[in-house]
Image: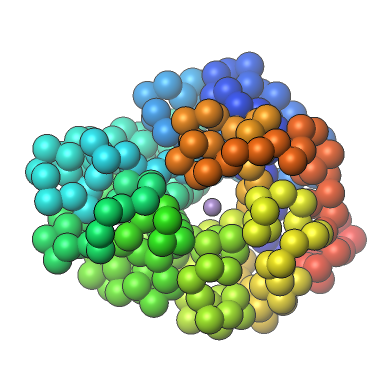
Amino acid sequence: MNPLGLHAMVVTIGGDATATRHAAEVAARTGYDLLELPILDPASLDTTAVRAAATDLGLQLATSLGLTRDTDVSSQDLTAVRAGTQRLHQAVEVTAAAGADWLCGVLASALGRYPGPPTRQGWDNAVAVLREITDHAADVGINLGLEVVNRYESNLVTTIGTGLDFLDAVGSDHLWLHLDAYHALIEEDSLDGAVRQAGDRLGYVHVGQNDRGDLASGTVDLVGLLAALVDIGYQGPITFEAFSRATADPDLANILAIWRSPWTDGEALAADAIAFLRAHLPDRTDA
Ligand code: MN
């Protein structure tokens, strides 16, 4: 049965112990199995508090991040590659210390719009770093989800096909594809095709609508996506991701071009989202 996850920024801006506890309480109260915590600054995560909140509330945990220009492991600038390597090692440590099973997101490049396509050297740099980071992940017993994002948020891995090439180049059982419906809508021929192409290399899924709001309305065929996930026997986490200026970290909101606040009540949105997910996942309809 797929763990159903809630992205913490649906309900809270902050990443401190109080905000994290609040997000965990909302996730548990609305029936989620998993809480995903953004760790753009991994060192700032209070791993003891997060672990305690998850244990108290019976939640699984995931963490996620996007690298920056200064920590871009797909750069040709070795200073940035080294800083990114250090950032990812730190993220792996923090993820394991918090008791999370997954570290996801834009792990192989900066999160943001690039001025040009990736370079061969940049690809090779990212592959080499991810080999080192997946070894670390294996040592501490976590998995990494390489999020496939749209062209405005990376230039490196923007399709499932390129993601498969990247996974092959890295060659680790601890690196999985992380498919996000919002990004796939822009880049893939079909969501169904993207799920089938990812197949058993798919480890983590974000469900989000084109307007990054309520799952039940919008142009992304999430019913079709969930049907495809069921059809291929996908058993991994399915995490609801949505962004409103009202509940997103301002810096992340700027990178993701979240200019408006179409909703302010994250808990209500989270409750609606899990009802939608349950309604379209056969083994969850009675949950
Ligand atoms: Mn996502």
Considering the image in quadrants, where does the C terminus appear?
A: bottom right
- Horizontal and vertical percent for residue 277? 78, 60
Q: Position of residue 82 (x, y in %)?
A: 15, 39
Is any part of residue 15 visible from this angle? Answer: yes
- Colour scheme of the rendered structure: rainbow
- Front-lying residue, 145 or 214: 214
Give the image location of residue 131, x and y in percent: 22, 56
Q: Is residue 154 left or right of residue 252?
A: left
What residue do we see at 72% from left, 49% from top?
213
**Front-most of residues 24 and 151:** 151
Name the residue at the right extreme.
Answer: 286
Looking at the image, residue 179 lies above or below residue 241: below
Query: At which x and y percent is residue 228?
Result: 66, 78
Vertical arrangement, residue 219 with respect to residue 196, above or below: above
Q: Can I make out residue 52 in this image?
A: no
Residue sitting at x 63%, y 21%: 19
Q: Quadrant of residue 34?
A: top right
In terms of image quadrants, where is residue 276? bottom right
Say which residue appears at 58% left-offset and 23% top-offset. 14
Residue toward you, 145 or 163: 163
Q: Is residue 133 left or right of residue 204?
A: left
Give the quarter of the figure containing the N terminus. bottom right
Residue at the image position 58 percent from the left and 80 percent from the top: 190
Whether residue 261 sits left or right of residue 276 in the image: it is left
**Count of residue discs:** 0
